Amino acid sequence: MKDVNERYRNFFQDVYEVVRQVPPGRVTTYGAIAHYLGSRQGARTVGWAMQAAHTLRGDEFVPCHRVINRLGQLTGKQFFGSPTAMQQALEAEGIVVQDDQVQNFPQLFWDPSAELQP
């Protein structure tokens, strides 16, 4: 069981490193991160990493609010401190959100496969 836990821990750390590079005012998706990390079917695991990241503090902070689903929806908002915290964090960066949907999602989408060196 230790090997499985270690693999998840390492994958989560890789996810966190990618998410920390998403610029303010931009968003990415669970699937885009998984694809960049070589796990095409790993979007759900990226979601688990985002859920676990809410316990990190200080230098370990991960801007989870910048990770949304492939349709531009705020599907992870239930893991923030309040039902509106994710939206408020995005809006503080200039992102317009209406009905849990990021407006202008295609223009705001940050693709790690295009932006980062493999």
Image (cartoon, rainbow, N blue to C red):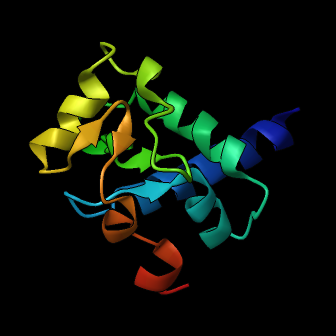
Comparing 103 with 14, the one in front is 103
* Residue 102 screen position, x and y as percent: 34, 47
Q: Residue at x 30, y 30 (%)?
A: 86
**Viewer can see residue 62:** no
* Residue 19 screen position, x and y as percent: 41, 56
Q: Residue at x 54, y 46 (%)?
A: 69
Q: Residue at x 32, y 70 (%)?
A: 107
Q: Where 106 sits versus 2, above or below?
A: below
**Viewer can see residue 7:** yes
Q: Where 93 sits versus 108, above or below?
A: above
Q: Where 26 sits versus 91, above or below?
A: below
Q: For residue 63, what is the image quadrant?
A: top left
Q: For residue 80, what is the image quadrant?
A: top left
* Residue 36 screen position, x and y as percent: 60, 71
Report whether 46 appears left or right of 71: right
Viewport quadrant of the C terminus: bottom right
- How many numbered marks does the figure carry? 0
Report whether 70 appears left or right of 56: right
Viewport quadrant of the N terminus: top right
In this view, the residue farthest toward the top is 82
In this view, the residue farthest toward the right is 1
Comparing 9 with 74, the one in front is 74
* Residue 76 screen position, x and y as percent: 48, 30
Q: Residue at x 53, y 50 (%)?
A: 71
Comparing 87 with 79, the one in front is 87
